[in-house]
Image (tube, coloured by chain):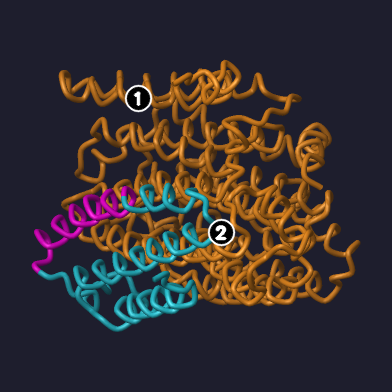
Amino acid sequence: MVVPLEHVIILSGLLFSIGVMGVLFRRNAIIIFMSIELMLNAVNLALVGFSRYHNNVDGQVFVFLVMTLAAAEVSVGLAIIVALFRNRQTVNINEMNLMKN
Amino acid sequence: MDLSLYFTRQDFWGILPEIVLLTGALIILSIELFARSQRAAMLGVGILSLVIAGGFAAKNFGSSFILFQGMVTLNDFSTFFDLLYMAAGIVTMVISYNYLERKGGETRGEYFALILFATMGMMLMTRGNDLVIIFLGMELLSLSLYVLVGFLRHDVFSNESGIKYLLLGAFATGFFLFGAVLVYGTTGTTNFQHIALAITNNEILSDTLLSLGIGLLLVGFAFKVALVPFHMWSPDVYQGAPTSVTAFLCTAPKAAGFGALLKVFLVAFPALHADWQDLLWALALLTMIVGNISALVQTNVKRMLAFSSVTHAGYLCIGILVLNEMGVSAILFYLLVYSVMNLGAFGIISLLEKEEKGVNFKDYEGLASKHPWLSASLALFMLSLAGFPPTAGFVAKYTLFSSAISEGYIWLVVIAILNTLVSVYYYIRLIVNMYMKTSEETLVPFLHPLLSVVIFILAISIMFFGILPGWLIDTVTQAARIYT
């Protein structure tokens, strides 16, 4: 049985929205980061769905690049979060307000 | 398998600048590994590789290639941007000389290597002819910048701006990607020409999804170039980042963002540009006004310049709205002049900065009597940012606004000119502090001959392009003609 394209798009849209909500409403930098990963994975799902629908592999190649980016972003991101935690002992982004006038 | 079909001699010569930059970055990282104290050598290799790569890129002026089966295009448009990024990279490297040490940090090899990687990323953004390449370039740029912004690891401000830039930048990437996927999904291709073809032949899956996709792409770009309401990160990031990095961050990547946005609208969606004009109009208006009003009340010079760069992004958005030959060439001219002015202004701030001092308006009181040349250059950059004749800032604003008037956007131009008038207040405020107030203790600049020469060249080019803009206008018109 072939899954219709609409189902893939709706699922991926839902996952993406959950990710956006997570970024907007969570206050812990690591959880926000996880939500961003969820957004990227929603993108991957949509890419695979469209790639299958159009019968060309461009989308699946794109998925590999997105996965590589996600990995690179996590390594850079966690390094920055660790550096921050060493100085501030917190990863709550509500406390990141040193620069308000 | 015969690879020569996929990687031709022409492809190699086309991406030679990128190869040079990559090699330079790897050499710098090797020096860092074996001789960590050789900072001058790392700086030298960095500048040398930018100069060599610039030489190879400049060779492409006047010719036009399509490389890697349509993934990358090389023409005057991309070459103009390549040279702009490389010049910005060289200036950034020079003004970084000894800067991190003065802030209590340490200049490591990564710093120069990351600037080279960021330059490569930006080059891919304006050379790319495919959503995948634009995405890769943008991420290569962003990942390098996240690290550069948080480079002062012991400094809480740098940490904070690093994490803000990282989280919001990655968030924006998500939007950009989802937009790219919807465009791919509805047209079945990621190549710009094929997307345009699918749209004119009406072979798209769903109009709604395509509009949603373009909207999300626009949100991603708006984040990267800091258009209101997606500008919230920029003041905090610009203020907290090391000033030498801020100089880079607010010039070349902004040019790259606008270059890629131009290319997307000019090559992939020329048929749909009319549908987006109302939105672009509103974005330009909001960005100008919000940036300007926020800049009025700042006490920190870096933060003021951050909001001023938001305002300038608003002016540039008018050019995206116009999008004819005149508008595009005006954007290119504006981006170059804008980069020179901001590199100069942030460069001087980075020379004056010492520990906590040198970033507030108050610190600049009485500077002119002690350091007349430095104050004069800073005053020149401020006047140019405000758009006074005979500086280049005036010519840039004039060409941009006149292109909008010729397309009939009278009201937008009237509002833009009113904004320019308001902006004079916060630029002149710095000049007033330097020249008309006195203070017992003034800032002591770190002056190295190399730094003085670079600041001098930036100041001279502001005057030169202001008085004799003809040559540059010819160049940008030629570059703009490629796509319009």
Closer mark to the observer between disc 2 and disc 1 = 2
Quadrant the N terminus of chain B occupies: top left
Query: What label does residue A78 carry, if any?
Result: none
Q: Is residue B339 above or below residue B322?
A: above
Chain B's colour is orange
Density class for disc 2 (Cα within 10 Å; few <14, some 14-19, many ≥20) is many
**Place of residue B477 in the rendered image (x, y in percent of width and height, measured from the top left):** 81, 40
Name the residue nearer the viewer: B79 or A73: A73
Amino acid identity at mark 1: Leu
Residue that lies at the very extreme toward the front in this rendered image: A1
Q: Is residue A89 above or below residue A95?
A: above
Residue bounds of the magenta highlight: A68-89
Q: Is residue B260 above or below residue B215?
A: above
At a point 61% along the width and 30% down the height, the residue shown is B67
User: Is residue B292 magenta-colored?
Assistant: no
Chain A's colour is cyan
Name the residue nearer the viewer: B290 or B368: B290
**Place of residue B10 in the rendered image (x, y in percent of width and height, measured from the top left):** 60, 19
At a point 47% along the width and 30% down the height, the residue shown is B90
Density class for disc 1 (Cα within 10 Å; few <14, some 14-19, many ≥20) is many
Which secondary structure type mostly characterizes the magenta part of the structure?
helix
Residue ID for mark 2: B184
Q: Quadrant of residue A16?
A: bottom left
Tell me if residue A6 can be seen: yes
**Place of residue B411 in the rendered image (x, y in percent of width and height, measured from the top left):** 82, 76
Tell me if residue B304 can be seen: no
Question: Looking at the image, how many numbered discs can be counted on the residues?
Answer: 2
Mark 2 vs mark 1, CA separation in Å = 42 Å
Residue ID for mark 1: B43
Taking A34 as reference, is B97 left or right?
right
User: Is residue A78 magenta-colored?
Assistant: yes
Taking B61 as reference, is B249 left or right?
left
